[in-house]
Amino acid sequence: MNQWLEWTLSFVALVTAIILHEVSHGYAALALGDDTAKKLGRLSLNPLVHVDRLGTIILPGIFLVAQAVTHTGGGVFFGWAKPVPIAPWHFADPRRGMMLVALAGPLTNYALTFLAILALHATPLLPDMVRGYALVFIGFFIMANLALGTFNLLPIPPLDGGRVVVGLLPERLAMAWARLEGAGIVIVLLMVFVLPLVLGQFGIQANPLALWLHAVGDPIFQALAVAAGRPHDLFVLLRFLGAGA
């Protein structure tokens, strides 16, 4: 397959996963009594209303150009969309409400992963060329949703997992944990980009984010694959994605 087409399909898969993740937060908030996102037009599937200049355009663009220049990466991207605005004071129980709204994002990604695996049952019916493109897109869509859902479950505010922890802890501990939100993104970026380099200087080849994604994401993927009937083309995708059968 043309490498540019492969990168384009992976980019579309990632952006779709991110947008549906964010929109699900807005719909969960609406169901709990907060219509802020609806009033601001953020429940739309139009990608333009969710674009974050850095997270949706610049950073994925850097990944795309770097992979094009180095001929490496296999269509791997990192990015985010503009967060959907939530007004927790509209909830009957703000802490519980924010926890449920936070959970909606990862659960949506896992539901999309399940639907993508399920769709593989139909791919043998497609013409060979169309089937090849469909498999590539479905593979990247599975990767994007599984990684996005699992990444956001990291228990660090303002990621969804951090807000779930705030909703579960006793009030005093929850307030202390919530105060991490201001530095949360810095902590995540240090963990993703800096900590592996630091550990490498001491001869420790470890990537905390990769360990988290595998520890949490792999069992979820296996459970979803079993629930979807483990379609034959799933093994083709596993080989294509380098994940092993």
Image: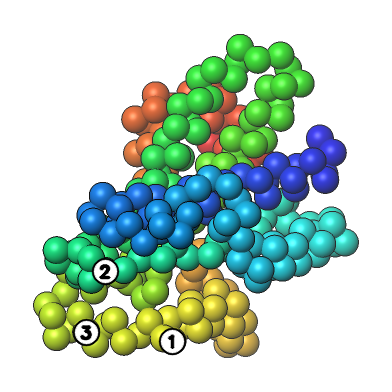
Sequence-wise first label, 3 or 1 = 3
Amino acid marked by disc 1? Ala
Q: Secondary structure at mark 2?
A: helix
Q: Quadrant of residue 133?
A: top right
Q: Is residue 143 visible?
A: no
Q: Which residue is mark 2?
A: 88
**Residue 185, position as x, y percentages in the image:** 48, 79
State the CA–CA distance, disc 3 to disc 1.
Answer: 14 Å
Sequence-wise first label, 3 or 2 = 2
Q: Residue at x 54, y 78 (%)?
A: 189
Q: How is the image coloured?
A: rainbow
Q: In the image, 187: left or right of 5?
A: left
Q: Which mark is residue 183?
A: 1
Q: Secondary structure at mark 3?
A: helix
Amino acid marked by disc 2? Pro
Q: In the image, 138: left or right of 115?
A: right
State the CA–CA distance, disc 3 to disc 2.
Answer: 15 Å
Q: Which mark is residue 175?
A: 3
Q: Residue at x 27, y 83 (%)?
A: 177
Q: Residue at x 65, y 15 (%)?
A: 126
195 and 20: which one is in front? 20
On screen, residue 84 above or below 15 = below
Q: Is residue 238 visible?
A: yes
Q: Secondary structure at mark 1?
A: helix
Is the residue marked by circle 2 packed among few (<14), some (14-19), or many (20+) residues within 10 Å? Answer: some
In the rendered image, the quadrant that contains the N terminus is top right
**Residue 220, position as x, y percentages in the image:** 37, 46
87 and 116: which one is in front? 87
Q: Nearer the viewer, mark 3 or mark 2?
A: 2
Q: Which mark is residue 90?
A: none
Amino acid marked by disc 3? Met
